Amino acid sequence: MKTILRLFFHLLYHQFAFTYDLVAAVVSLNRWKDWVLNVIPFIEGVRVLEIGYGPGHLQRSLLTLRHVAPRPIGQSHSQDTALRHGSGQVRNLVAVGIDESAQMGQLAKRNLRRRGFFHSQTNSSQQPDSPRSSAYTQASLTRGIAQQLPFPNESFDTIVATFPAKYIFDPATLAEVWRTLVPGGRFIILPGAIITGRSLLERFMAWIFRVTGETPPNLPEILHERSREPFAKAGFHVETHEIAVKSSLVFIVLATKNHIKEETKYV
């Protein structure tokens, strides 16, 4: 089963990337994008890197994000409220994305170009402009892997990944994230969600998630134990959050970069 699933997800993220949005919408009962947007209240600063940007939906939301008043962590979030609240002053986010899939890169650029957020292309042989050197509201996408981020030290205020594969817990990934975050910077991971609704269709989809191992029933405990030691060793202080969204629970791992790696803390 695991081998078949690995092949399925590989094809979905590469050769069949054009079907990704449809599949994600079906398996989540059209909640996938709402789940993803719940990372936004956790973002701090204006220099933001997304690891594994996929079709580019979070990139688009970041680039349209206006300055909002601080919201309590754990409060449900939607794109509409993010754009309506606050002073209306544009934050001019430096939104950068990196993904290893060439097919997803093409899909994201096409999606962002339609909305006027992408005008130039960066390929895998080019290093993106340093996020410190520009302030713009345009997408900057590059191809690469999380274990070898092509950015200078302390380039970002926040790094985010939604529904990533197991590479996100790789010590090499954590080391690169720590290197490229400013002191006190945030690494936000949305590793999964659980459908909690009681309708027949909701229970069926929740069962599918469980039997495929995508959202085991003890996911909170797994996340806590899985992130505790590796993140502490990498120099992060870790918290986990559960957010109720449309008859489902979204899980967020919030890792804050310690000023020195020797400061390891557990919660």
Image: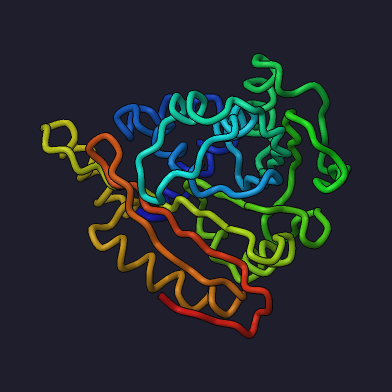
Q: Residue furthest bottom?
A: 262
Who is closer to the viewer here, 116 or 124? 116
Asked if one can make out residue 175 in the rendered structure from this viewpoint, the answer is yes
Q: Give the residue displayed 45% in from the left and 50% down from the top.
A: 190
Who is closer to the viewer here, 171 or 231? 231
Q: Is 132 left, or right, of 180 in this rendering?
A: right
Q: Quadrant of residue 114?
A: top right
Q: Residue furthest front?
A: 87
Q: Is 124 left, or right, of 60 in this rendering?
A: right
Vertical placement of 144 versus 166: above or below? Answer: above
Asked if one can make out residue 7 in the rendered structure from this viewpoint, the answer is no
* Colouring: rainbow
Q: Give the residue displayed 62% in from the left and 73% down from the top.
A: 258
Who is closer to the viewer here, 114 or 106? 114
Who is closer to the viewer here, 173 or 259? 259
Q: Give the residue displayed 34% in from the left and 67% down from the top.
A: 222
Q: Quadrant of the C terminus?
A: bottom left
Q: Residue 185: give x, y in percent of width and height.
A: 64, 60
Q: Residue 66: give x, y in percent of width and height.
A: 59, 30
Q: Residue 105: give x, y in percent of width and height.
A: 68, 33
Q: Residue 78: give x, y in percent of width and height.
A: 41, 31
Q: Give the residue displayed 80% in from the left and 53% down from the top.
A: 150
Q: Residue furthest top?
A: 114
Q: Quadrant of residue 142?
A: top right
Tally the numbered discs: 0
